[in-house]
Image (tube, rainbow, N blue to C red):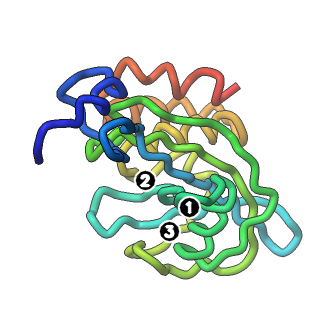
Amino acid sequence: SGPLNSLCTRDFVEPAASGTCLCGEKEFCLCTPSLAADVIIELEDSVGTVRHVVFIERKDGRGLAMVGGFVKVGESAEAAAAREAAEETGLEVTQLQQWCMFSEPRRDPRRHTAALVFVGRARGTPRSGDDAKGIRVVSISDLQRAPPKFAFDHGQIVAAFVARHHPLEAHAGWRRRNHRSSGGSAADAAYDGSCRV
């Protein structure tokens, strides 16, 4: 690719960075991180009790991931989260609430992506659709004691969610496992701070 528009470089912390840019004729250029809307779907049983969480299996083999995707221009983050849930799982998510923003620059190796994570409820049988390889319904108990492999930093995000919404002493083992698999970073504090308490 060619050199960055000089108006665009002001939006990067490091001059050699890359990202999503929108440039006009001479006077306008804006480069920002991509915005994703992800949702942790708590699956209710017939009486409204939550015992499982819905995830997608990625086609690229990186592991499980939260349901979600990029927000479209002209779309709210809430609408994007509901749309992605319907497209990827066939579920209608209710009680959708913003939980936390995760924006550490290295969280996604492909490009700087900020993820606004929602928590929602759904009932029914999820079915794989859109760009997901498959669906995995994981019990809360397994998330607390024997979590599966997750893509990117989704394991740390889900760990923070479990600690906040479904806490057990067994969560300590989950954190040790996921911090080892991710290699740890200066951003670890972001997953243990205000988003969890």
- Of the numbered discs in the image, which one, if any, rests on residue 136? 3
160 versus 92 height, above or below = above
Report the label total: 3
Is residue 15 visible in the rendered image? The answer is yes
**Between 6 and 33, the one nearer to me in the picture:** 6
Q: Are marks 1 and 2 in contact (CB under 8 Å)?
A: yes
The amino acid at mark 3 is Arg
Instruction: Give the image location of residue 41, x and y in percent.
Output: 65, 60
Is residue 52 visible in the rendered image? The answer is no
Looking at the figure, which quarter contains the C terminus? Answer: top right
Q: Are marks 1 and 3 in contact (CB under 8 Å)?
A: yes
Q: Are marks 3 and 2 in contact (CB under 8 Å)?
A: yes
**Mark 3–mark 2 distance (CA, rounded to whole Å):** 10 Å
Instruction: Return the residue found at the far right.
Output: 47
Mark 3 lies on a secondary structure that is strand
Q: Which residue is mark 2?
A: 148
User: Which quadrant of the figure has residue 78?
Assistant: bottom right
Instruction: Give the image location of residue 18, x and y in percent.
Output: 24, 38
- How crowded pointer 3 is (Cα within 10 Å; few <14, some 14-19, many 20+) is rated as some
User: Which quadrant of the figure has residue 44?
Assistant: bottom right
- Of the numbered discs in the image, which one, if any, rests on residue 138? 1
